[in-house]
Amino acid sequence: MFAAEECTQDRFLDGRLLVAQPRNGYRAAMDPVLLAAACGAAPGQSVLELGCGAGVASLCLGQRITGLRQVGLELQPEYADLARRNATANGIALEVFEGDLAHMPGPLRGMSFDHVIANPPYFAPQSGTAAADAGRERAQREATPLADWVRAGYKRLHPGGWLTLIQNADRLADMLAALSQGGGSISVLPIAPRAGRPAGRVVVSARKLGKGPLRLLAPFVLHAKAAHGADVEDLTEAAQAVLRHGAPLPLVP
């Protein structure tokens, strides 16, 4: 498990959350914040996060919406422990199970949820250079196929429940193929770094057993200026609302 001196204390949502993350392991940035913002949960509903890591997405969601029943599943025990500690430190209820989504822990197999959210690993097997830290490598490198993440999410949903994912834009075709097997009413939100630039990420939401048409939404633009300026934050007003103030990203009409 991570000792206190092995972690930094990082602020999310303009300091509303203080989250311990390993100095040298996998560290969450804005992607889990965007994922949480895209989840259309309502008070009283239940949410499962697959691969919750240190808990950032679930904690951002719990900070925005009170009265949720939140559950996380994490493969790496040291990150599962960190998620529990972070939830306690921030006063947000989050039950975290340790295990592989391809072999769901027994208690989870008997549960179903209104929403499932996930930020699957972005990097394909044997691509690029492996991370020096084993925990970071495991979090970022795909070992379980993306289609298995989708199947696991659908299995844990009530009929009519929503599965929401964030992923690299170049994996969109794989996501749509998997999501069409058991779901529909798909919405795709491209996340572009700047106006006129290609999207690097996509947030995708699908409804279990949904029959509605696919919706391709206008890109969500993160930065206002045409190029990065040193030591100057240039988030668009919309991005500031989501990343700093916890506003939702409306994917579902």
Image (spheres, rainbow, N blue to C red):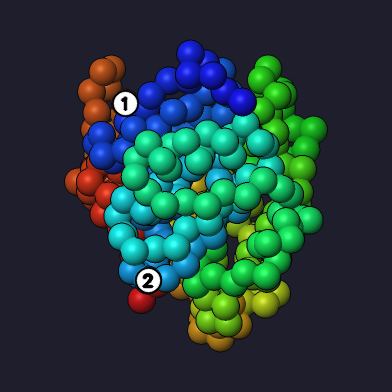
Q: Which residue is mark 2?
A: 44
Q: Which residue is mark 1?
A: 228
The quadrant of the picture occupied by the C terminus is bottom left
Tally of numbered discs:
2
Residue at left offset 59%, top offset 72%: 112
Q: Position of residue 59 (x, y in %)?
A: 40, 47
Name, please, the residue furthest toward the bottom.
211
Residue at left offset 26%, top offset 39%: 16
Q: Position of residue 212 (x, y in %)?
A: 51, 84
Image height of 159 relative to 5, above or below: below
Reading the chain from its start, which is encountered first: label 1 or label 2? 2
What amino acid is labelled 1 in the image? Answer: His
29 or 20: which is nearer to us?
20
Residue 232 visible within the image: yes
Query: Element under label 1?
Result: loop
Q: Position of residue 90 (x, y in %)?
A: 34, 40
Q: Position of residue 2 (x, y in %)?
A: 57, 23
The tag on residue 220 is none
The quadrant of the picture occupied by the N terminus is top right
Horizontally, residue 17 falls left or right of residue 39, namely: left
Image height of 159 relative to 239, above or below: below
Residue at left offset 44%, top offset 63%: 69
Residue 120 visible within the image: no
64 or 178: which is nearer to us?
64
Image height of 153 relative to 221, above or below: below
What amino acid is labelled 2 in the image? Answer: Gly
Name, please, the residue furthest toward the left.
237
Graded by Cα atoms within 10 Å as few (under 14), some (14 to 19) or many (20 or more), the crowding at tag 2 reads few
